[in-house]
Image: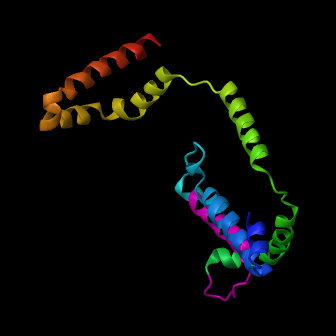
Amino acid sequence: MLDKFGKDYNIEPEVLESWKNECYATRIWAPLIGKPDILFDVNVPGHVGSCLDILRQVFVEMFTQTAHKVNKESPPQKLLFHKDIPRYRKLIGTFFKRVEPVNDQDFWSEIDEISNRQNATLNFSRQSTFHQLYNLFIGKYSSEILDDLKDMEESKDLQFANKLEEVLDLMEEFSNDS
């Protein structure tokens, strides 16, 4: 798409390359590298998060066109990977030339195929999901939640506390049966 745009409007190759880098690196992959929990069901501990942030910054840096000057006041991640960035940039230079354009029909048929494969292997259980939510939140904080529901005027009229107590009883029965 960007190549077609660049050709139609006679955009300079450097500007076109910058557009591609911006779209691909900083808008798609960099957020996923820095925070994989956006897409994946993973828990990222704090010490791992800061390491991933450094990798994200290096990834973005290798897609930039201009080299940043590094001195003794530069952040540690820039000093750590400073010597590797030029080598990474050379690899990126040929990356977009190797990417083949895909038409809409091929794209959507591939998406459908992936979706069908995923649906075939997906085992979803509502009961199991409710049980996990119960164990993570409701079971832990049931007394606090019940107290809050009993104190709130809006929930008194709707009898939310009584309804939650019924759910808690059912979940306890389910837990004892398992």
Q: Quadrant of residue 62?
A: bottom right
Q: Seen from this angle, which residue lies furthest top?
A: 177
Total label count? 0
* Residue pictured at 77% horizontal, 80% vertical: 14
Residue 58 in sight here: no
Q: Nearer the viewer, residue 170 or 31?
A: 31
Image quarter in which the N terminus is found = bottom right
Q: Seen from this angle, which residue lies furthest front?
A: 8
Query: Relative to 172, is 48 on the left or the right?
Result: right
Which region is colored magenta?
49-74
Q: Quadrant of residue 141?
A: top left
Q: Nearer the viewer, residue 39 or 103?
A: 103
Query: Relative to 145, is 63 on the left or the right?
Result: right
* Residue pictured at 65% horizontal, 74% vertical: 77
49 versus 20 height, above or below? above
* Residue pictured at 48% horizontal, 27% vertical: 129
Residue 15 in the image: state x and y as whole percent. Answer: 73, 79
Residue 143 in the image: state x and y as whole percent. Answer: 24, 32
Residue 30 in the image: state x and y as whole percent. Answer: 64, 62
